[in-house]
């Protein structure tokens, strides 16, 4: 059996390679340096390059890649290296596997030791040790595993399994047999406890419970300060990146919801906006000196002191130096409401501005949340009956027009906008025609720490050129 070992030249990787070879495995290594060894293949995360020969005949991948966390002070530059060497490299591996349809029996990805808790200890932890019980460990488990109550865990339950079937589809005690029974049906399985992930609103709420947060669990500013990356999510795009484990055939369509990508995207945006409001309502006021800062736009603060990031915005009405809420989903829903018509975009725009100002002045924002929730519910209700099939091009034009006008140029908004435009071009069947343009826009968003709104706007101007 051949195994591709990524990070095979590090401390653990070097010993693992020797062990695998002793056990009779053929080991391919990905390396950033050229080698005369025929089993070592070149890759470069910065250039998004992997020698595809590395995957030939490989049955599985063990990914240990990541810069040494103890090598040097954690400066901003060092933290960028630590992040990119783990997150972006793993993403490159995944996208290369998916693009080239590499068939694997397994993919093992190294994970963080924070799982065991943050208390100082002389104990050496092993895989069979239980997780930590402190706050950070619980948050990790809530988002990265099926962390059900102890009394609900069966004999074979293992928290180490991470996010498995039941984490998304619900406890399988009642439907484990029926969901593969040809004489059963989807309605019966849902009644037996299967979560209705075919329904876009329910799916969005489930996904956002981790990828945005709830009143019980959330990637707070404290957790981000400990190293958790900034959280971003878009329902349709992330769903497309998830390897499908179902087929939308006639049987699927007979029993389950099967709308278009544009429907999933629109519902996902509205649901995310509503969930953002719920988090502001529940978690903004922490009762201390600072509010829950994770609810604000990270880039409003995290940028070079010598770099001018602030621009006047009709959307928020905030002065220079003000820390603004992360309103990315509201802004995208504004474009959707504008195309849908009937004036809901005007109400939404006014209410978003009132929310920004109320939060900035530490005033009563409950009325703004209530008004925004009502408007979003109205838009959501209309989505159930409106046909968006002819709205793809108007939506693209609306987002590009608003970008050039300077209304969609915060990084968090820009990344949502380009994911939407990418999906809409694919929906129209013309994505290939705009692939070079998309690459250019994406290149302006590649490094959020050095994002230039001017470069982003300039790339958007080239649409259709």
Image (cartoon, helix red, strand yellow):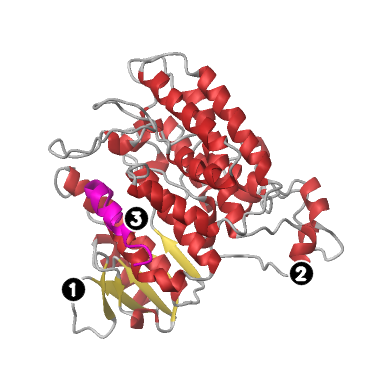
Residue appearing at x 37%, y 35% in the figure: 223
Span of residues in magenta: 444-465
Q: Position of residue 224 (x, y in %)?
A: 34, 37
Tell me if residue 455 comes above or below residue 356 in the rendering. below
In the rendered image, the residue lying farthest to the front is 342
Helix, strand or loop at label 2? It is helix
Helix, strand or loop at label 3? It is helix
Residue appearing at x 42%, y 73% in the figure: 433
Nearer the camera: disc 3 or disc 2? 2
CA–CA distance between discs 3 and 2?
38 Å
Q: Which badge, 1 or 3, is on the more N-terminal residue?
A: 1
Residue 124 visible, this angle: no
Nearer the camera: disc 1 or disc 2? 2
Tell me if residue 268 comes above or below residue 118 in the rendering. below
Residue 35 visible, this angle: yes
Q: Quadrant of the N terminus?
A: bottom left
Number of the label disc, if any, that sits on residue 87: 3
In the image, 83 versus 269, the foreground residue is 269
Is residue 216 magenta-colored? no
Q: Position of residue 439 (x, y in %)?
A: 33, 66
Say which quarter of the image contains residue 93: bottom left
Q: Is residue 75 left or right of residue 200?
A: left
CA–CA distance between discs 1 and 2?
50 Å
Tell me if residue 165 comes above or below residue 319 in the rendering. below
Disc 2: which residue: 250
Tell me if residue 448 comes above or below residue 149 in the rendering. below
Residue appearing at x 62%, y 65% in the figure: 245
State if disc 3 and disc 1 touch (CB < 8 Å): no
Helix, strand or loop at label 1? It is loop
Disc 1: which residue: 33
CA–CA distance between discs 1 and 3?
20 Å
């Amino acid at each position: 059996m051949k195994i591709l070992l990524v990070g095979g030249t590090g401390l653990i990787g070097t010993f693992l390679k020797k062990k695998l070879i002793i056990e009779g495995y053929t080991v391919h290594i990905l390396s950033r340096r050229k080698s005369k060894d025929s089993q070592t293949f070149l890759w470069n995360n910065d250039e998004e390059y992997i020698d595809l020969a590395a995957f030939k005949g490989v049955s599985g991948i063990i990914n240990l890649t990541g810069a040494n966390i103890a090598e040097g002070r954690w400066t901003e530059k060092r933290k960028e290296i630590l992040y990119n060497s783990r997150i972006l490299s793993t993403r490159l591996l995944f996208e290369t596997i998916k693009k080239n349809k590499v068939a694997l029996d397994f993919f093992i990805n190294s994970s963080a030791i924070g799982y065991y808790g943050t208390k100082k200890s002389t104990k050496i932890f092993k895989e069979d040790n239980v997780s930590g019980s402190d706050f950070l460990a619980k948050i990790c488990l809530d988002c990265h595993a099926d962390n059900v109550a102890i009394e609900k865990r069966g004999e074979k339950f293992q928290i180490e399994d991470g996010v498995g079937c039941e984490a998304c589809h619900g406890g399988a005690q009642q439907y484990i047999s029926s969901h593969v029974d040809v004489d059963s049906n989807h309605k019966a399985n849902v009644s037996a406890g299967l979560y209705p992930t075919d329904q876009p609103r329910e799916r969005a709420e489930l996904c956002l419970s981790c990828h945005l947060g709830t009143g019980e669990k959330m990637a707070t500013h404290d957790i981000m300060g400990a190293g958790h990356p900034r959280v971003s999510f878009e329902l349709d795009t992330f769903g497309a990146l998830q390897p499908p484990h179902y087929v939308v055939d006639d049987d699927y369509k007979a029993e389950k919801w099967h709308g278009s990508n544009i429907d999933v995207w629109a519902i996902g945006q509205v649901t995310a906006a509503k969930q953002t409001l719920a988090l502001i309502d529940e978690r903004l006021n922490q009762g201390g000196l600072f509010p829950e800062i994770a609810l604000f736009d990270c880039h409003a603060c995290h940028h070079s002191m010598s770099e001018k990031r602030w621009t006047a915005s009709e959307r928020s009405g905030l002065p220079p130096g003000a820390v603004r809420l992360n309103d990315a989903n509201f802004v995208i829903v504004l474009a959707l409401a504008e195309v849908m018509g009937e004036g809901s975009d005007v109400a939404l725009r006014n209410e978003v501005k009132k929310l920004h100002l109320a939060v900035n002045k530490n005033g009563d924002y409950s009325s703004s949340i209530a008004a925004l929730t009502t408007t979003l519910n109205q838009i959501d209700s209309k989505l159930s009956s409106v046909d968006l099939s002819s709205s793809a091009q108007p939506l693209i034009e609306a987002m590009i027009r608003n970008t050039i006008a300077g209304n969609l140029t915060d990084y968090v908004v820009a990344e949502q906008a380009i994911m939407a435009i990418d999906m809409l071009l694919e929906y129209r069947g013309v994505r290939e025609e705009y692939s070079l343009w998309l690459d250019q826009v994406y290149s302006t968003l590649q490094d959020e720490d050095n994002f230039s709104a001017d470069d982003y706007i300039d790339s958007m101007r080239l649409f259709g050129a």
